[in-house]
Image (cartoon, rainbow, N blue to C red):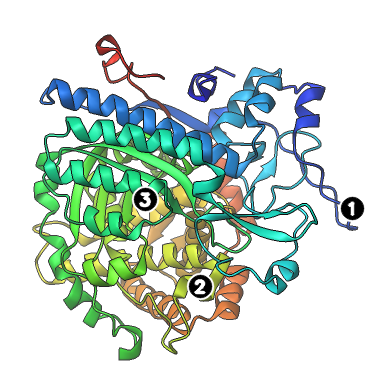
Amino acid sequence: MNHTLKLRLVGAAAVSLIAISCAPEPAPDNGMQPLEVVEPRPDVYADFTLTADLTALSDNQREMVRLLIDAAQIMDDLFWRQAYGEDYETWLESIADADTRRFAELNYGPWDRLDGNKPFIQGVGAKPPGANFYPVDMSRDEFDQAYLPGKNGQYSLIRRDQEGTLKLVPYHVEYAAELKATADLLREAAKLADSTEFASYLKLRAAALISDEYQVSDMFWMDVRDNQIDIVIGPIETYEDALFGYRAGYEAYVLIKDLEWSDRLSRFAEFLPALQRGLPVPDEYKWETPGTDSDLNAYDVVYYAGDSNAGGKTIAINLPNDEVVQLSRGTRRLQLKNAMQAKFDKIVEPIADVLIDESQRDHITFDAFFANTMFHEVAHGLGIKNTIDGSGTVREALLDLSSSMEEGKADILGLYMITELHKAGELGEVDLRDYYVTFMTSVFRSIRFGASSAHGKANMVRFNFFLDSGAFVRDSETGRYHVDFDNMDAAMTDLSRLLLTLQGDGDYEGAAELTESRGIIKDELQRDLDRLTDANIPVDITFQQGVAELGLESDGGASQ
């Protein structure tokens, strides 16, 4: 049964007994308080239809888009199995209440991703930190002591053999049939591509999916520049593995390049080496030279699937994640303009009406929101990928905290880049205050993603750091915030230095202390966030998407 059809079902707050029996077992009684169960709340997502202007596409390109959407739908199925389990379709069908079912679809399971992964169905227990990548009864100690070469790899599952001993199962073995079907679709799409470079990439990515060897296709993707249609597909981000941060979840984006906006952005990547040299840390924390052959473009996204579609939606992409590729070639930065506009219109501006001082509200603009998001992605290329003592990568050293530390670094260094480029006159006749006030407003947006999100956690750290530094100031009478521009530069420099040092040192304990002390929502902030809820401002967006929304239905051939 095509699961995407089920994900379109309009769902309503009771769950059948079958639903409870199919869910994971409750957490064992360990003397702690019973786990809070929250109400399903599908209304925290604002609907948005993903469309793009396809009039310039040839018939072959339109058919290619349909094939890529079919491939993306398979990624969606695989992520469901990684996040929840093999029986997710039966479980979804068993949920009697439509609102609960709809919320389960949006969260890829019975845990509210925008509220700290709290369960919204009785009896399911806590979300396993290792999702379905590891046995639910496996402890960290058991994993650490197990002799399993490659056990910290991104593209394998940990399972038990018949004797109960831990074993590795590669993705390309566990999901062989589905990955072959995906590879076949990519090869069919390659035959229709106008760009020979993109056709070659699709064939290389097909080979990568069925071998779990992604570096060659990642390298080649860096050279794919002349294609109007693009796809990001495979096991990419490790956010879902909250146990160790090792294992990657399947996802996909189908994209149409916005040629006009892309032309505006093309020149910024060349500034990376100079900006790297100017980072406010000792030389050993910035010895790596970011690749200068980076690509920066704007796209309309026409399909999200899997990890990218779960909870808070991505509005910009910085890939590949492979540190070897990044250091030798840089990355590609893809700005998802239509999704970004939706978040600005439906969330950022309404937040400003409630929480931002009227004297600074005119500084909140879409251009600043777009630029802040864009430079966040560019800033992933700054800093350091390997610890300064040579013991390994930052990602390996910081484990489950690596994602939130990296997102926090990219946020603050993105603002650093904007400040430095503005000083150099590279941003034109714009008001730097627009970027700062829009940045603060967007922090409120991202905090609402909750502690289960790397982006939400990073934003909580930054909000508290800036509040304590006097860069963000709350008026006790109005309950509204403004930026203190005099304090902003110092706070930005201090936090940049702290995060870069934690990463370069591979300081897990320091990163944990920062997260525990600053990555929290204090009572006053929670009351302010509650005002956003009372004003019915959505937390994030969800998509109506597919061939019908793109006007491709009449061409035939694609499932939905």
Side of 157 relative to 367 (left or right): right
Indicate which label's residue lies in the foreground, 1 or 2.
2
Residue 449 seen: yes
Indicate which label's residue lies in the foreground, 3 or 1.
3
Q: Earlier in the sequence, mark 2 or mark 3?
A: 3
Q: Which mark is residue 396?
A: 2
Crowding near pointer 3: few (<14 within 10 Å), some, many (20+)?
many
Which residue type carries mark 1?
A: Asp
Estimate the spatial distance between the alpha carbons at disc 1 and disc 2, rounded to whole Å: 32 Å
| Residue 57 sits above or below residue 331 on the image | above
Q: Position of residue 87 (x, y in %)?
A: 67, 32
Q: Report which quarter residue 226 is drawn in.
A: top left
Mark 2 element type? helix
Residue at the disc numbered 1: 29
Q: Position of residue 198 (x, y in %)?
A: 18, 43
Residue at the disc numbered 3: 208
Which residue type carries mark 2?
A: Glu
| Residue 356 sits above or below residue 346 on the image | below
Do the CB atoms of the residues marked 1 and 2 lie less than 8 Å apart? no
Which residue type carries mark 3?
A: Ala
Estimate the spatial distance between the alpha carbons at disc 3 and disc 1, rounded to whole Å: 43 Å
| Residue 248 sits above or below residue 392 on the image | above
Indicate which label's residue lies in the foreground, 2 or 3.
3
Residue 315 seen: no
